[in-house]
């Protein structure tokens, strides 16, 4: 069962999903790169992977199932173990007398179908589905896992031997022995696995006066996960220090370390920070999934003209592409997604990062180490002698790094980097403050991307109409009109639809979706350098002047992009306002 290139091209043209000129350009690129037309259309952002799957299912005549509104019976779900379901994207969702209907992303995976058939003893009926359906079904496994983890922690914490508060009188050997005690090992292992399953980005372990508080940051918001007995504190800290190769008997100074953990489905690196506090040592661990593959720009939230501007910049062989935003706004993920698009056999890509957050095949990644004098600037000097075509600098923090990045772009390299500013336009004054000459910026900057992250509404959400009075409190009428124009341009609302007719949405908490939100998506502004923008960069270089000119040239600001996504039901207005005000 395979869709031929000719059949796929003909159907997409007939459907009108993609403009013919874009299909022809993608077909030429596919031929040059020896890739399929579908793969190129997805990488260019013309189609989503899920839309491509739906097209293939239609052409092949395979049933397509949507599991988003489908509650799978627990006994049916359990027919395929969670690790296999997650790794191979396959869900058992309907059992008949002698057959089992399974939803898959790849119905051509015959060995997997045969394996499930042997395990269940049933005839397997493959059905095509999309990634959102798979994610929704996997959540149903996670709920049972969370309950199981809670039971383990409750059981094991009761076995911890009572020690003096904070372990102040324990020697290094005592702490090492405690770190290897089975109850402590199981508790720490459970805490970490629990965090991975819930999709946490950070784990906070905080000693209080009478207990230890564990919190997870999920989708950017901190949540209390559980409390543990105070007696567990010394053992947990010791265990994490052992995993991170830190000094066990050093409790007065902060320490930083790192370790890795593998589950059936994930390989996760934990970046550990330990800080002395009044009631003991507080631990914060940042979770870094070690694969940057599988992202697409449209999945990150880019669309329309923003997406076109980025793809146009990525086709250049020289210049600088900057991503701006505060800490935790998804800048690095955007960089890696662009690297994934650029990562072809005919280019050499080198990076200098702090830390290496994702590991990518065929990319030469280097981590800075300021303690031994290996900084971004020193690393960048060495990188340009490694014959790179594309350089990624984790962050431009100072004038020296900025100057070296500019020089690299001037000498025939494409440079990707991040900078801490509140908006895309704010990156130019920031670089000038660092000592970069404006005429050098004019010659090298291609696009600057400003971004924030907002939580996505779950599938089950509450629709409401926004009155003019409420709209005025949220943003100006112009901002809403720009968002509506973008919806019209992308044919997401019918011609003639007015702002008063556009519905907005609120979160609707449920058992599957506790606060009505699940996962996150970016809101963006993409400032491309035009002749008028370059003229302002040379003379005024103020944030307001740059932003005003960019808006005249059609740039959606982050607020306008947020309103666009709120009108599409992707997020809520409250989330947009929370993100842009940070």
Image (cartoon, rainbow, N blue to C red):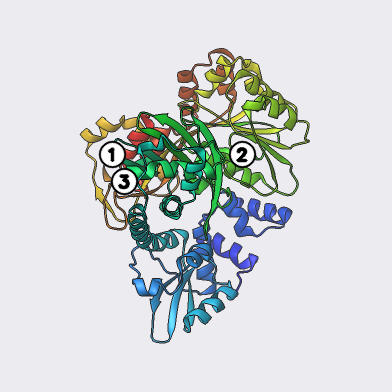
- Separation (CA) of disc 2 from disc 3: 51 Å
Viewer-closest of 477 and 105: 105
Instruction: Please tell me whether mark 1 or mark 2 is closer to you in this view.
Output: 1
Q: Give the secondary structure at mark 1.
A: loop
Which residue shows up at 31% across the image and 29% down it?
476
**Quadrant location of the N terminus in the rendered image:** bottom right
Instruction: Please tell me whether mark 1 or mark 3 is closer to you in this view.
Output: 1
Write down the residue under mark 2: 312
Write down the residue under mark 3: 227
Q: Could you tell whether 491 is left or right of 291 in the image?
A: left
Write down the residue under mark 1: 210
Viewer-closest of 571 and 365: 365
Q: Residues within 10 Å of mark 2 (few under 14, many from 20)?
A: few
Q: In this view, does 131 lie above or below 574?
A: below
Instruction: Please tell me whether mark 2 or mark 3 is closer to you in this view.
Output: 3
Q: Give the secondary structure at mark 3.
A: strand
């Amino acid at each position: 069962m395979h869709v031929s290139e000719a059949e796929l091209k003909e159907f997409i043209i007939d459907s009108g999903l993609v403009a013919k000129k874009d299909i022809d350009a993608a077909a030429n690129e596919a031929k040059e790169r020896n890739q399929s037309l579908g793969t190129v259309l997805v990488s260019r952002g013309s189609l989503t992977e899920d839309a491509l799957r739906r097209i293939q299912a239609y052409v092949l005549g395979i049933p397509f199932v949507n599991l988003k509104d489908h509650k799978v019976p627990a006994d049916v779900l359990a027919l395929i173990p969670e690790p296999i379901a997650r790794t191979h994207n396959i869900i058992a969702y309907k059992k008949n007398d002698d057959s089992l209907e399974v939803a898959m992303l790849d119905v051509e995976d015959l060995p997997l179908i045969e394996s499930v058939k042997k395990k269940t003893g049933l005839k397997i009926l493959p059905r095509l589905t999309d990634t959102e359906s798979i994610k929704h079904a996997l959540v149903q496994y996670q709920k049972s896992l969370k309950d199981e983890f809670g039971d383990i922690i409750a059981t094991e914490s009761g076995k911890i031997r009572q020690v003096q508060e904070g372990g102040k009188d324990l020697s290094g050997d005592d702490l090492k022995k405690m770190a290897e005690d089975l109850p402590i090992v199981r508790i720490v292992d459970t805490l970490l696995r629990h965090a991975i399953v819930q999709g946490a980005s950070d784990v906070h372990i905080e000693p209080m006066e009478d207990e230890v508080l564990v919190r997870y940051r999920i989708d950017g918001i901190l949540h209390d996960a559980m409390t543990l007995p105070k007696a567990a504190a010394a053992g947990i800290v010791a265990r994490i220090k052992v995993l991170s190769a830190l000094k066990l008997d050093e409790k007065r100074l902060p320490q930083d370390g790192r370790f890795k953990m593998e589950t059936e489905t994930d390989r996760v690196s934990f970046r550990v920070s330990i800080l002395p506090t009044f009631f003991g040592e507080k631990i914060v661990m940042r979770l870094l999934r070690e694969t940057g593959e599988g992202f697409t720009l449209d999945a990150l939230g880019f669309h329309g003209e923003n997406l076109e501007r980025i793809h146009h910049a990525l086709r250049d062989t020289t210049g600088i592409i900057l991503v701006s935003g505060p800490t935790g706004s998804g800048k690095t993920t955007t960089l890696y997604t662009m690297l994934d698009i650029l990562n072809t056999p005919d280019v050499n890509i080198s990076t200098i990062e702090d830390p290496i957050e994702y590991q990518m095949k065929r990319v030469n990644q280097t981590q800075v180490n300021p303690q031994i004098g290996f900084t971004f600037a020193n690393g960048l000097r060495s990188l340009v002698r490694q014959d790179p075509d594309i350089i990624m600098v984790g962050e431009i923090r100072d004038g020296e790094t900025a100057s070296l990045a500019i020089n690299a772009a001037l000498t025939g390299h494409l440079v990707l980097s991040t900078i801490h500013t509140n908006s895309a336009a704010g990156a130019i004054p920031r670089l000038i403050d660092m000592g970069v000459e404006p005429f050098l910026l004019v010659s090298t900057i291609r696009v600057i991307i400003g971004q924030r992250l907002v939580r996505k509404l779950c599938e089950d959400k509450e629709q409401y109409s926004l009155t003019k009075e409420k709209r005025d409190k949220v943003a100006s009428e112009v901002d809403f009109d720009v968002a509506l124009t973008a919806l019209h341009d992308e044919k997401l609302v019918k011609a003639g639809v007015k702002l008063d007719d556009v519905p907005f949405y609120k979160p609707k908490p449920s058992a599957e979706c506790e606060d009505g939100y699940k996962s996150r998506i970016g809101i963006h502004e993409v400032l491309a350098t035009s002749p008028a923008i370059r003229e302002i960069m040379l003379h005024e270089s103020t944030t307001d002047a740059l932003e005003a000119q960019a808006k005249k040239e059609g740039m959606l600001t982050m607020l306008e992009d947020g309103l666009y996504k709120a009108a599409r039901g992707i997020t809520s207005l409250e989330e947009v306002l929370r993100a842009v005000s940070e």
